[in-house]
Image: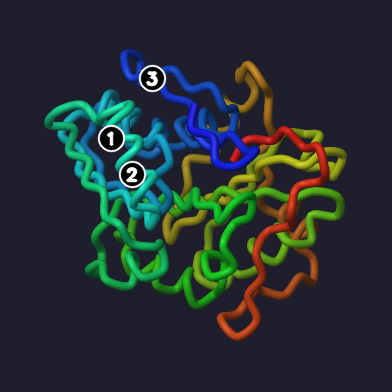
Amino acid sequence: MVRLGHADHSWVNPDRPDLLLFDYVQRIADALDACAPEGERLRVVHIGGAGMTLPRYVAATRPTSAQIVLEPDVALIEEVRATIPLPKHSGIKVRPIDGRAGIAAMPDDYADVVIVDAFAGTQVPAELTTVGFFGDLRRVLRASGMAIVNLTDHRDLHYTRRVLAGARVLWPNVLLSAEPGTLKGKRFGNLLVFAGATALPEAALQRKAASAAFPYRIVSGRHLDRFVGTARPFSDMAPEPSPEPPSGSTSWF
């Protein structure tokens, strides 16, 4: 377990990288499994590293995949490498740089998938959910690529609505995934935004959602339209981090 402060950020079984403890991480893995045929090589960029659970998962399920992890916490990288080292020849390259700067330095049309799963303490950094950042993210993605953004929110989900509004400025295809209690604003939790220039694997995700150990919902189409409503996107001039978790919350990040 990688714990930063009072929050658990990663769980890793180095001998079984296909075992995923956190439910939102399993949901991201479901999307990765659905975005290309089984075993097919992918180029994946991970913004946020922690224990590198998902890079290990991709390396195990899609050998020869090229992966880049953008993680600015050098001390954390060193501790993870010492305690739970990456497997040899994993194809995982870790760059000690923050997500915004790391994406800005990447070439056009590079990645099949970009996963934004980064936290400053217990909050998603403000600069990673603006229209400006999403524009750079789309530039780095291939035409058929998919962006996955992990958020945390609660109550009226106003923050999530604004992030979705920003994603819909850049991508014609956007989905939202959440556990029912979180989606209804009853509990603080993780919500995932999936975005792409081409069709997303919605049918496959709906099947995964229905059969998951912890069932979740996929929101799309007119239901997503109603959910977003009149929310305004975040801009680089007025960004905001995700809400702080309620006192005593035990959510994972």
For badge 2, the amino acid type reads Ile
Dot 1: element? helix
**Mark linked to residue 18:** 3
Type of the residue with mark 1: Arg
Question: In front of the other: label 2 or label 3?
Answer: 2
Left-right relation of 84 to 87: right
Tell me which residue sits at (12%, 31%) in the image.
89
The residues bearing labels 2 and 3 have C-alpha atoms spaced at a distance of 21 Å
Mark 2, residue position: 77
Q: Residues within 10 Å of mark 1 (few under 14, many from 20)?
A: some
Which mark sits nearer the N-terminus, 2 or 3? Answer: 3
Residue at x-position 63% and y-position 75%: 239
Residue 108: mark = none
Q: Secondary structure at mark 2?
A: helix
The residue lying at 43 percent from left, 50 percent from top is 48
Q: Residue at x 79, y 61 (%)?
A: 158
Which quadrant would residue 253 be assigned to in this image? top right
**Residue beneath disc 1:** 81
Q: Which residue, as the protein is rendered here, is positioned at the far left?
A: 89
Q: Evaluate if marks 3 and 1 touch, with contact meaning CB atoms under 8 Å apart.
A: no
Do we see residue 220 in this rendering?
A: yes
> Could you say where residue 10 lies in the image, as x and y percent from the top left?
49, 33
